[in-house]
Each structure stands twice: as structure tokens, then as C-alpha cells.
Image: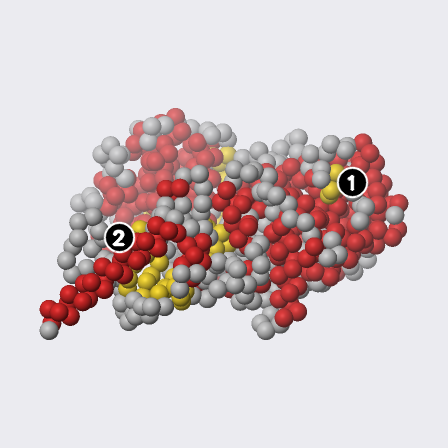
């Protein structure tokens, strides 16, 4: 009897163990490594990557039972029936088959392996061995080639094992059709082999083992691989905080090596930390914790970093291959990684009564800011998460991560700064930050520079300290106080008390104090006063255009502006003033930005902002380029009445659009504007609508329409369509219409008079003809 614990290869099973036939019995599941679902594809790619390396590979344990069996051809053969390992054996067999057929690398036992799960599987593999000789056309898909062969029976394609075998062969062909060397030593792929018959284990056990029907979980697989590489040094060589682990039996103290303590703890309190009462499971949260810490240890350049970050643990079909861990956990890194993980888990166990913070620290992050916050908190060097030292550290980490981290690059920059500059001071962070305020006044990261400055105040100014902490908690600020603390290019706490008081007065506790409230005069005045003051302080285009909802000061938009440095000076100026109505208007930085200046001047006309904000749509308006002019209108604003056209006057008169100015002029000439004025002040020439109707008091039935394309003409007052001339006139529009772009008010008035005259003459001619 062969030794059961010896390392074998597929060739050795036939040559030394003297098995004449290996078959997958009916009770086994179909071949899975050739499926096309996400998990199988990753497994297949990993296997073929390993094979391509041409390095010695260990494919685990394969065990089963042997029997003497009468075959259909009348012969009796010694057979091996795999219980565990049939997937790996099948893949190894297909590699050997492809190597012999395509590259003439001899194997010699192609007829010695088959599937008995269904007749289609068995017959297909037999036909494949007999009829395929490695051929296919250049550029042809191997799977399609085999499917189109005359010897391939169509119904075989419905068998999942057949389909999976074809997919695996296709993948092998895609990767190795030009690489015969890959197949020249398949004996480098070995496995531990066990024949259960040699241990007097009967068929009953075989049936029980196969009826379990449960695959190893992702966690079980990773855990078993970790177990193989756990450091076996004595635990005194590690700083792992095992003394914090609460062990009622004291058994942990009797274990001397790191590996022993790890195995003991992970099967007990470490796992209990992650127990989910809803799913009755701890595997996924604990696995996520291990892999997320691997992300911060491995770093931005690690070859599997994007794969690790992209893992979706909420997807029940997610797959985490061991190579994501194994690629990093080499002799250089393995000790440090496990030392840090053990220390973290022991601290979490020690703080298990602090339920909320522990829950936060073991939750599964779904964004870079969440990852940064969690990593930063876990980097605390102390042991007590309820201590004042941890609370101060948490305040710093929150302010830093939330206001700096947004993507992969900023996330790893954050990790490096925490590890290199701050973690070692985590139990006494404020004094360290205050020292850095003196030492690193040129800190390039503005949030850190702010934290240094605030630390000085928190340590030495008790009155402002309370205000600083209160302001950091405001939902509109989230720890970023630069709009309240930066004066020009420098941090300055002078006036902070006034600024913070005004901030709360104007924005309220939730930031929604300036939102629209219908028929609320007090709310309208407050909202309009701040919007007007804010607009007066705008000096650059990117504070006004760029798709901003210019007059929107609801919580969401307000918070967004407070996060952008370009608005710091505006907020500070507004919040320093006790009377916003008297705040000085600042001139625009660039006097050549004519359209920007005109847009700002338009809004600052008397009662214009009030006229806009008394409507719910008012806060949604933004400046957009519309038909070669500026227009103030909401996103997806298809309703002409929701828009406000802005005159465009510049150094190229031929491009001027001066509708508002001209409409005011026409009003003085007895024209009636059929549109709602934006302002209650009659001196302001601004109307709602990108299409404006008007008529002369002498001709109330002749309706003129000045549309968004800057065409002006006569329309049917019932259908609102252009009225056409009965007879074309050379040089004139077929409609009673003309283009106004580049024309001044006198020219436009003259054209209107001519238009009305022509129209009346045509109408009179038509009446005469009818008589």
C-alpha cells in the first residue's frame, strides 16, 4: 500500500500508484473552474497565472477511495474516485491534455480520466481525446472550433461540465498556445494524496462527506492560508498587546508562540467582536477588517491594491483570492502585518464595552474618506478608547480625514502623514500640533496648517477654545474653520467670536436658516440680505459662474461653498459685519471680464435679489451661456418663464444683446411689456422669461414676440406662431420678423415701426381684395 502522506503528481497516480482509471462519480458536482461567473473566472485566471510562472506548486490535499471496477468494455481496472480535489484534478488533466494535443508534450494517460456525472460529460471527454489533435484556424476561438466539429454532438453543449471544460481549454489556449515550455514539466504541480481505503474508512463516510454540500467560506480559505505562514517565534518578540485580551480560562498565558496565541484568539474573542446578529455570521466583517488593514500596509503601489479596494463585501458572490494577501505577506512584511493586526484586535477586545466606538472601528468602509477615518482612529497608540487622549486624537483625525481625503492619491498621502508624522504622538496630540504651528508655518496642506493653528488656541485660550470646538461640530463646517479664521493669507483668531456668533445667527444650527419659506417676509428679507452681501463680495468669475446656484444658501450648497477656498474671504467679510445692508461692494478683480461684471451689476439692482428669491425657483437659478448670451435659469429649466435674460454689451457691438435696455426704452414709447418684472422697482429693466411678448398701446391686437434667439416679430396672438408675409419681399424675412443682435434701441424701434407698417398695409390690401 502506498504511503498516504506522500506528495504526488497526476503522472505518479498512474505510474507509481498504479491507478488505471480516475473518474468523477455521479455524486460529485459538475466541473466548476471553467464556469464564466465572476468567482470562477478569478479562480481560473489565478490558476493559469500560477502555471505560467513555471514554479513548483502545491495544490493542497486530494483524497478519495480506490476500487476494482468492471468497465463497459469488459475489463477490470483499479480506479480512484476523488472525494475532495476533483476540480483540481480535472484542471490538471486538461493542462496535460492540451500539452499533448497542441504541443506534443507526452502525457500518456489521456484515456485514464473521465466524468461519470452524466453520460454527456463522459462521452464528450472520450470523443475529445479521440478526435481533437490540437488543430484550429489562426485567430479562431478554440471553444467555437470544437463546437463546430462534426464529431461534437449538439446536446453535449447543454451539459454544464462540457461547457466548463471548453471554457477552461479556451483559457489555456488563449494563454499558452505559443508557450510549449509551460507543459514540459507539469510534475512541478503536486498535491498531498490520501486513499481513505488505507485507513479502513468505508463508503458510508464517503457519502456523508459528499452530502455536506457546503463549500469552505471565503474566510475559512484565507484563514487556512494565514495559518501556514503565521510566525512561530516566541511572543515576547512581538508587541501585540496580548495582555489586553480578557481570557477567563487563563489558557492564553500558557501559549508561548505567536502562532499559538493567534489561533487561540481568532477562534474566540476576536471572532466574537465581529459577530453580526442579523446574519448570524462574523466571517465577512472580520475578513474585511484583515484585508482593509492589508490595504494600508501594502500601499498605493501594491499590484493588487485596486482589487482590494474594489471588493464589495455586501455582494454575496464577492471573491477574495489568497494571492491578494500572499503577494504582500512575504518574509519581509509578514511579521509586521500580523503584529499590527493582533495588537488592534486585542485593543478592540479590551474596549468591547465601548460599543459605539468599537462598532465604528470594525465597520466596513465604502469610500476613501471612511477608510481614512477608520485607519486614523486605529492608529491610536493608547489602549483606552474612552480616554480624553483618544477623544482628542479622534477630533484631529476626523477634521483631517474628512476635509482632505477624497480619492486614492489623497488617501495614501493621508496614511503616510499619519504613520510618519502623527501616530507616535497620538496620546498627546494637541501639544505636538501646537509645536508644529511654530515649526511648520509653511505647511502645504491647509487643513493641517489650520489644525496646528487651532491647537495653539485650544491650549492657551479657554474662551475661544470652547467656541472652536463648538464650531467644528457644526454640520456646515465639519472641522474646517478657514472661512472663519483666515484673513487674507494668514490665520487670525481676531474677531472669531463675532464671526461665530454671526454664523449661527445667519445659518442656524443646521445650516437651513436661509432656505425658502413661502409668504414669510422676515425669511425673505434675511435670505435676500445675505445673498446681496455675498454677491457684493464676489470678485472672480469662478465665484459666480461655473454652474453655481448663485443665490442658493440652503444647507447643501452652503456647505459646498464653505469647503472651497475661493469663498473663504467672502464668508469672512460677510460674517464680520453686523449690518449686511451696509456692506461695501467690492469691484471685480479683472476689469476685462465684461460679462461677469454685467451679470453682477444686474443682480445688485434694487430689489432684484428679493424679486428672485420670493419664488421657490429663485434659489435654483445659475448663470449659463444660452443662445450666445448670459441667462439666469435652473438646471433643466425648459420653461421660458423660469429664465431671466441678461444683456450682453462688449467691445464688439455686432454681438451686443441689449433686450432689457431696449424693452425699457420701448416702454417709454408706449409699448406694453407682457412679462413679469423681476423687481418691484420700476427703474429696473429686467423681466422673467427668455421669450418676451409686447405690443404698442395703439395696436393692442398686433402682438410682438422677442424670442430667445433674439428674433423679434409679429405672432398670431392665438397660436403664438410667426405670421408670414403673403408675398416674399427681397431682403426681408419671409415672416414679419427681424434679427436684433447688434442693433441699438433706435434701430430696433425703427424696424418694429416698419414691421407694423408693412403688416398693416398687407392687411388692408387683403381686405380690399376680399371686398
Q: Return the x and y of residue 494 as percentages of the image width and height.
A: 81, 46
Name the one closer to the observer, 642 or 297: 642
| Residue drawn where x is 63% and y is 52% of the image | 534
* Label at residue 452: 1
Tell me: 249 left or right of 113: right
- Locate residue 541: give its quadrant: top right
Query: Marks 1/2: CA distance?
Result: 71 Å
Residue at point 70%, 63% (across, down): 508
Residue closer to the observer: 627 or 505: 627
Where disc 2 sits, the SS reads helix
Question: In the figure, is residue 744 to the left or right of 335?
Answer: left
Q: Residue at x 79, y 50 (%)?
A: 496
Q: Which secondary structure, mark 1?
A: helix
Circle 2 sits on which residue?
Answer: 156
- Tell me: 527 left or right of 654: right
Count neighbours of disc 1 (C-alpha within 10 A) and say few if under 14, some if 14 to 19, many if 20 or more: many
Residue at 29% x, 67% y is 702
Contact (CB < 8 A) between labels 1 and 2?
A: no
Residue 580 lies, in percent from the top left, at 69, 56
Viewer can see residue 286: no
Q: Quadrant of residue 10?
A: top left
Q: Is residue 682 visible?
A: yes
The tag earlier along the polypeptide, 1 or 2, is 2
Q: Nearer the viewer, mark 1 or mark 2?
A: 1
Q: Residue furthest top?
A: 181
Q: How many marks?
A: 2
**Quadrant holding the C terminus:** bottom left
Tell me where residue 760 appears, x and y as whole percent.
23, 64
The location of residue 113, given as percent across then percent down, is: 35, 44
The image shows residue 357, relative to residue 333, as above or below, that is below
Amino acid at each position: 500500500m502506498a504511503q498516504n502522506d506522500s506528495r504526488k503528481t497526476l503522472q505518479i497516480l498512474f505510474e507509481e500508484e498504479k491507478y488505471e482509471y480516475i473518474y468523477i462519480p455521479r455524486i460529485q458536482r459538475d466541473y466548476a473552474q471553467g464556469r464564466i461567473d465572476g468567482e470562477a473566472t478569478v479562480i481560473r485566471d489565478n490558476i493559469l497565472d500560477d502555471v505560467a510562472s513555471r514554479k513548483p506548486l502545491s495544490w493542497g490535499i486530494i483524497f478519495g477511495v480506490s476500487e476494482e471496477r468492471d468497465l463497459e468494455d469488459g475489463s477490470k481496472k483499479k480506479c480512484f474516485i476523488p472525494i475532495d480535489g476533483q476540480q483540481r484534478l480535472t484542471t490538471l488533466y486538461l493542462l496535460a491534455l492540451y500539452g499533448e494535443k497542441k504541443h506534443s508534450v507526452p502525457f500518456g494517460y489521456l484515456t485514464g480520466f473521465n466524468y461519470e456525472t452524466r453520460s454527456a460529460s463522459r462521452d464528450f471527454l472520450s470523443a475529445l481525446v479521440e478526435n481533437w489533435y490540437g488543430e484550429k484556424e489562426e485567430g479562431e476561438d478554440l471553444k467555437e472550433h470544437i463546437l463546430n466539429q462534426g464529431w461534437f454532438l449538439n446536446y453535449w453543449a447543454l451539459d454544464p461540465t462540457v461547457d466548463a471544460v471548453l471554457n477552461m481549454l479556451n483559457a489555456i489556449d488563449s494563454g499558452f498556445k505559443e508557450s510549449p515550455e509551460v507543459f514540459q514539466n507539469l510534475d512541478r504541480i503536486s498535491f498531498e494524496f490520501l486513499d481513505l481505503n488505507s485507513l479502513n474508512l468505508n463508503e458510508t463516510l464517503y457519502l456523508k462527506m459528499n452530502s455536506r454540500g457546503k463549500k469552505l467560506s471565503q474566510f475559512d480559505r484565507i484563514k487556512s492560508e494565514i495559518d501556514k505562514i503565521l510566525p512561530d517565534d516566541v511572543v515576547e518578540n512581538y508587541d501585540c498587546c496580548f495582555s489586553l485580551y480578557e481570557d477567563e480560562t487563563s489558557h492564553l498565558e500558557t501559549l508561548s508562540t505567536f502562532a499559538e496565541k493567534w489561533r487561540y484568539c481568532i477562534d474566540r474573542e476576536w471572532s466574537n467582536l465581529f459577530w453580526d446578529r442579523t446574519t448570524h455570521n462574523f466571517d465577512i466583517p472580520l475578513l474585511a477588517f484583515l484585508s482593509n488593514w492589508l490595504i494600508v500596509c501594502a500601499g498605493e503601489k501594491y499590484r493588487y491594491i485596486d482589487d482590494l479596494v474594489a471588493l464589495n463585501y455586501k455582494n454575496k458572490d464577492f471573491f477574495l483570492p489568497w494571492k491578494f494577501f500572499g503577494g504582500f505577506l512575504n518574509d519581509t512584511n509578514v511579521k509586521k502585518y500580523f503584529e499590527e493586526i493582533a495588537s488592534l484586535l486585542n485593543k478592540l477586545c479590551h474596549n468591547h464595552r465601548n460599543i459605539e466606538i468599537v462598532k465604528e472601528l470594525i465597520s466596513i468602509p465604502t469610500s476613501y474618506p471612511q477608510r481614512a477615518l477608520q485607519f486614523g482612529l486605529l492608529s491610536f497608540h493608547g489602549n483606552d478608547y474612552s480616554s480624553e487622549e483618544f477623544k482628542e486624537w479622534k477630533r484631529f483625525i476626523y477634521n483631517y480625514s474628512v476635509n482632505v481625503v477624497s480619492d486614492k492619491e489623497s488617501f495614501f498621502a493621508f496614511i503616510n502623514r499619519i504613520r510618519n508624522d502623527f501616530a507616535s504622538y497620538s496620546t498627546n496630540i494637541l501639544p505636538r500640533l501646537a509645536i508644529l504651528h511654530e515649526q511648520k508655518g509653511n505647511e502645504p496642506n491647509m487643513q493641517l496648517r489650520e489644525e496646528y493653528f487651532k491647537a495653539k488656541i485650544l491650549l492657551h485660550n479657554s474662551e475661544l477654545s470652547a467656541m472652536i470646538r463648538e464650531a467644528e461640530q457644526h454640520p456646515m463646517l465639519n472641522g474646517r474653520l478657514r472661512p472663519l479664521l483666515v484673513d487674507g493669507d494668514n490665520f487670525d483668531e481676531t474677531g472669531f467670536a463675532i464671526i461665530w456668533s454671526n454664523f449661527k445667527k445667519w445659518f442656524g444650527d443646521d445650516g437651513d436658516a436661509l432656505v425658502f419659506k413661502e409668504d414669510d417676509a422676515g425669511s425673505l428679507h434675511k435670505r435676500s440680505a445675505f445673498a446681496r452681501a455675498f454677491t457684493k463680495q464676489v470678485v472672480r468669475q469662478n465665484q459666480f459662474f461655473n454652474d453655481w446656484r448663485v443665490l442658493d444658501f440652503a444647507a447643501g450648497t452652503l456647505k459646498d461653498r464653505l469647503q472651497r477656498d475661493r469663498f473663504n474671504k467672502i464668508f469672512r467679510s460677510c460674517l464680520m459685519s453686523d449690518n449686511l445692508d451696509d456692506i461695501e461692494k467690492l469691484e471685480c478683480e479683472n476689469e476685462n471680464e465684461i460679462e461677469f461684471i454685467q451679470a453682477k451689476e444686474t443682480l445688485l439692482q434694487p430689489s432684484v435679489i428679493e424679486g428672485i428669491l420670493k419664488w421657490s425657483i429663485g434659489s435654483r437659478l445659475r448663470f449659463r451661456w444660452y443662445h450666445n448670451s448670459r441667462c439666469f435659469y435652473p438646471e433643466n429649466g425648459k420653461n421660458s418663464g423660469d429664465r431671466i435674460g441678461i444683456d450682453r454689451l462688449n467691445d464688439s457691438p455686432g454681438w451686443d444683446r441689449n433686450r432689457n435696455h431696449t424693452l425699457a426704452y420701448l416702454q417709454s414709447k408706449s409699448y406694453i411689456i407682457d412679462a413679469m418684472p423681476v423687481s418691484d422697482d420700476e427703474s429696473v429693466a429686467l423681466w422673467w422669461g427668455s421669450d418676451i411678448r409686447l405690443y404698442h398701446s395703439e395696436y393692442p391686437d398686433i402682438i410682438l414676440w422677442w424670442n430667445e434667439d433674439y428674433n423679434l416679430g409679429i405672432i398670431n396672438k392665438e397660436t403664438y406662431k410667426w405670421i408670414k408675409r403673403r408675398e416674399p419681399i427681397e431682403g426681408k424675412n419671409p415672416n414679419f420678423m427681424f434679427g436684433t443682435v447688434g442693433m441699438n434701441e433706435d434701430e430696433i424701434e425703427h424696424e418694429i415701426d416698419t414691421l407694423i407698417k408693412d403688416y398693416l398695409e398687407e392687411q388692408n390690401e387683403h381686405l380690399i381684395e376680399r371686398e
